[in-house]
Amino acid sequence: MAAGHLARFGFTDNERTEAVAGPDGLGLWDPVNRRPADDEAAAVLDTLYFAADPDLALFELHRLVEAAGPEVAAAVREDKALRRRLIGVLGVSATLGDLLVANPDEWRELVGEQNSRPAGYTTREVSSVPSLRSGYRRELLRIVAADLTGAADVEVTMRRLTELADATLQAALAIAIAEQGSDTCRLAVIAMGKCGGRELNYVSDVDVVFVAEPDGGADVETAMRAGSALAARMMEICGFVAWPVDAQLRPEGSRGALVRTVASHLAYYRKWAKTWEFQALLKARPAAGDLELGREWLAELQPLIWSAAERPEAVDEVRGMRRRIIEAIPRAEVDREIKRGPGGLRDIEFAVQLLQLVHGRADESLRTPTTLAGLRALIEGGYVGLADGEALLRAYRFLRVVEHRLQLQRLRRTHTVPDDPTGLRWLAHALGYRPNAARDAVESFRAEWVRHAGEVRRLHAKLFYRPLLEAVARVPTEQLRLTPDAARARLDLLGFADPAGALRHIEALTGGVSRTAAIQRQLLPALLSEFADAPEPDRGLLAYRQVSEKVGNTPWYLRLLRDEGPVALRLARLLALSRYVTELLVHDPEALRLLADDAELVPRSAEVLTEGFAAAAARHDDPETAINAVRALRRRELFRIACADLLGLLDVTTVGDALSAVIDATLRATLGVTAGAEPPLEFAIIGMGRLGGAETSYPSDADVLFVYEAAPGMADDAASGVALTIAEELRRLLARPAHDPPLGVDADLRPEGRQGPLVRSLGAYQQYYARWSKVWEAQALLRARVVAGSESLGARFLALADSTRYPVGGLTREQIHEIRRLKARVDSERLPRGADPATHTKLGRGGLADVEWTVQLLQLQHGHAVPSLRTPRTLEALAAATAAGLLDPADAVALEAGWRQASRVRNLLTLVRGRASDQLPRQGPDLAALATILREDAEPQEYLDEYLRVARRTRTTVERIFHDA
């Protein structure tokens, strides 16, 4: 019963709590009367309730009393300030509790006025490493106590932790000098990173750079040896006392010299440093050692730091830094990472630093190493809006407090919010959340975390571009923040080739005081970020203007972009990368709604499409109007597939299936219009080539054969005429000029090619294949598949085709030689003039033709004996040949890799260029766009090298198999 009453003070370990709090323990609880032992005990229990972990605080207090004696128990009862400090520390960190128990006199550090001396006071004048360690620990205890009791806010806490770090560095260096002497060099310790920014957290490496100069007449080499020895010993001492000292930010990183002169630093930064290294120097601050030397070093570097943004490679290097940050996060932790994850501290810091690099060239008020000071300067200077800046300030302070609490628990470096209920409850309590009538403590914490993270995500992109938009938008003069020249410089930095033209587009979109312009001003910062990530940002912005001007005045358009999370960013990516998608969207802006939901980007099956296309056609009596409706639906489906493809939601085989299903449904609906509901004869369309194999690409025509069978009693001439009319009308309707991509219906694979009749009866096909067909026609029939019309007639045609494409006994030696001769002619004659055979995806070395001819040769040779080879699909046939032992598995892997690569690149070339193309370029923006789509982190030349490597391996495999088969 007593334990139940104790639970109202936040305790959960009932039996142990009663024992520790009761008369035999701390004497805080009267178990007989089930209440606190006295008023002072009640005050202690009330304070324990507000600890991060009341059970831990109680048990650690009991341990401390046992170690330090009754004096501490009496002091906790009598001294309210001490009580809050000590219980706060004991309840938040078992590690700090253990340290206090191990050093029982150090609780006295929490007695009396806490802010009367600077942080690091007890680390001064120390002469040994143990005394420095003890002094550091005592100062840290005071900082933690002030933090937990609200005596110091997060900014003061960060500053005091930095002051303690500075003092520790200075003391460690003094010890090293006492041990080794310093007659030959002057050594400055430059704080970098969080320490340099005066925003250190509890558990972190301290990033530094060392600068040395000869002293006392010593030569440079001697001075550098002495300086390196001092620096190394200082780092060793700090690692034992407090935290590791990390000098990786020095020139050349771990491969570079630990200590350099000012001149050596300048030489490196002038010649070799990348943009991210200058970004790191924004945090540089002399912290210990020879401060005058440190200030001299920093002054010499200032011109280099503040001109870094003008370097031509600045954008690429900033993007590379961003990429590396994202890649460093384990996928399982990305949503719980408050530092590097989306909506985390890194978003704020990175944005502030980029704006400092760009605008600090002209505005010295921005030249501060501290994130919050820099953000306030950006707000005051008008580079960031007041409301946006305040939101980021609040979010930054909140996230840093969360980070501090997480690190205090075990004094370990971590930035990841726990995902277990116990850990979340501890964190919520440590942050001061308590249950209320509406929600529990964890829910309250989550709600605030989500709100701040959402604000940071929303404002992160906007922070880059808000000054630009305020400068170019037509707003009242007093609200202008950037001159047009400054705006052009920003666009130039972000990779726009024509900043003046980009400004005109932005001005056209955001000019005026209309609601449309206001929403565009909200959207463009994030969209510009996406455009800037594409190889041709100007193209993306122009396309966005074109689409916006087409539908910008319709109420749903901008509301969709503003309110439906992924739509705006997806649209920006698609427009920046794909002329094909842009053209589709300009003529069908309603399709934009598909981007709101991944489910809407899943391709529809041929059956679903057929039903929808047929229903659309049936609403119209006029054939042309009916097919216009079908083609409009086809355009919508092409947009769906292309978007899903570019967004990485589909693999190449799924794309082939989906595009083939669209053609199937289009042919079926059109055949329904041209043949009527009850055609006077049986008529079927046989898919051939890539359509037959369900491997259609975006530029593919519909390769088909038309077959009919006359109704009983119908004359052959009459039947032929009806079938010809159906086929010709189908081709005419689908070839009419329109806004959707054309669908050519190509029947050139029919017997006798273009010289033969467009349509044939089943009997005529049978007669032709039995008497006159050539081996290439048997090869073409391997891809035959019924796509529209009479299923029974189509099945009879395929049965007829089987005897030709899967001949009993396989191919003769002469037929094999003929196929090889034909392939050689294809290689030598059909490759377009001037084409690069190494990168031609269809006819080049290791391209589609290489793989497909090889697989088809195996099908022709062995299809009669191996039923699983009887498939129109290349990869299915490849798998079947491997399973049947006709191919070595390693060869099959090489062939499949080459086929997938060539198919994917061929598709993407069409999407990027907006027209059919088989040639992968060796340089230029189209290659960069492909690399961006295929591998977000790949440089264009890296991707080209990979393509060539895969193609070479495929070609080697083809040459061996095709000519030895």
Image (cartoon, helix red, strand yellow):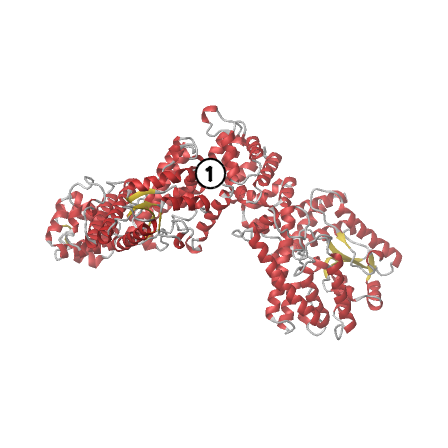
Residue in the foreground of this view, choosing between 34 and 201 = 201
From the top left corner, tell me how far across and down residue 705 is, in percent. 77, 58
Residue farthest along the top direction in this orientation: 477
Left or right: residue 472 versus residue 240 is right
Three-letter code for the amino acid on which mark 1 is drawn = Phe
- Count of numbered tags: 1
> Label 1: how many residues lie within 10 Å, few (<14), some (14-19) or many (20+)?
many
Q: Residue at x 70, y 74 (%)?
A: 865
Tell me if I can see residue 48 in this picture. no
From the top left corner, tell me how far across and down residue 264 is, in percent. 39, 46
Left or right: residue 110 versus residue 726 is left
Q: Residue at x 54, y 43 (%)?
A: 567
Q: Residue at x 89, y 57 (%)?
A: 717
Tell me if I can see residue 542 in this picture. yes
Residue 791, quarter of picture = bottom right
Left or right: residue 10 versus residue 535 is left
Q: Secondary structure at mark 1?
A: helix
Residue 386, quarter of picture = top left
Q: Residue at label 1?
A: 464
Tell me: residue 782, above or below residue 587.
below
Image quadrant holding the C terminus, namely bottom right
Left or right: residue 392 versus residue 581 is left
From the top left corner, tell me how far across and down residue 813 is, in percent. 77, 73
Residue in the foreground of this view, choosing between 718 and 859 = 859
Image quadrant holding the N terminus, namely bottom left
From the top left corner, tell me how far across and down residue 742 is, in percent. 72, 47
